Amino acid sequence: MKYFLILLAIFATFGLFSGASEPVISPLQGTWIEPILHSLHIGNSIIFSLSVAYLGSFFFWALVVQYPEAKRRKLLRDNLSQHYQQFKESVIQVLLFSSVGTHESKLPKKLCDHVEFKAYFDANGKQRWYEALNGLDDRNDFLQDLLFEMELLASEVNYVLNNVAIQDERVHSSFKLLNQNINRLKNSSAYTDDPVKYVGNFLWGILARWSFIDGQQQDDFLELMIKKV
């Protein structure tokens, strides 16, 4: 709809010049566009009036509706992107505490890069990763910390879904699926046999950009979806 209105505004602009009583206004005389305006000029007052009316409505819509909505959408998109980055850092920090205990303060941010994350946790036959999972088994508070971070992410995604009209069906369905997966993981009764395993698989998929269906991914799928909000 937005692009259709812009297209009509372009046609209305041509209608404004072609329908005017004067073929070329003084600021445009002697410019490269003057011959084009002369060729388009028909001097029709009805076309001129309709063009003026539409352009007035268009600029009113752009200033009162479109600009504030675009600004608001950017604010929510940037906020969600920042929270997603914080989510990854917080989750990695919990995994580090669960596996090796103390760590350098800058390490969680460094491991947000999926290549660095895999190099760190995948080394020696995934020894550190299995240590992290074992730590989650031994310390339920670590597991609850991860579930809490996931719940915060789902809350941010829900806020965007409820406050932005997302036209891209793929983005909308991806966000809904993310929230559904997080809600399932929060419900421990659904995975009573091994909740740590399912939480670990979910987080590995995000942090290592690994799909258990398509294999290694080059792009952060969720990050791409956020950019399309």
Image (cartoon, grey):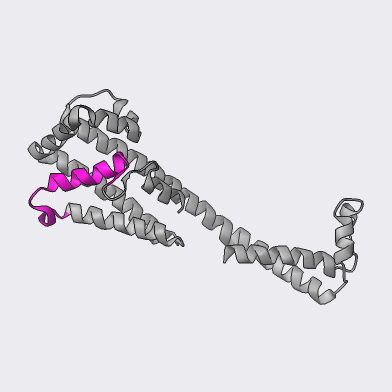
Quadrant for the C terminus, please. Answer: bottom left
Quadrant for the N terminus, please. Answer: bottom right
- Name the residue at the front extreme: 214
Of residue 148 and residue 207, the one placed in the foreground of this image is 207
Q: Residue 136, located in which quarter of the rendered image?
A: top left
Expressed as whole percent of the image width and height from the top left, the position of residue 37 reads 86, 61
Of residue 22 and residue 31, the one placed in the foreground of this image is 31
Expressed as whole percent of the image width and height from the top left, the position of residue 3 reads 60, 62
Quick check: can you spot residue 138? yes
In the drawing, does residue 18 fall left or right of residue 198? right
Q: Residue 183, located in which quarter of the rendered image?
A: bottom left
Rendered residue at 89%/69% (across/down): 21
Q: Is residue 82 magenta?
A: no
Quick check: can you spot residue 128? no
In the drawing, does residue 111 fall left or right of residue 227? left
Rendered residue at 28%/29% (across/down): 119
Rendered residue at 19%/24% (across/down): 102
Q: Magenta region, mostly helix, strand or loop?
A: helix
Q: Eyeballing the image, is 187 above or below 4?
A: above
Q: Is residue 193 magenta?
A: yes
Q: Which residues are magenta?
A: 187-211
Rendered residue at 90%/65% (across/down): 22
Q: Eyeballing the image, is 100 above or below 228?
A: above
Expressed as whole percent of the image width and height from the top left, the position of residue 209 reads 32, 42
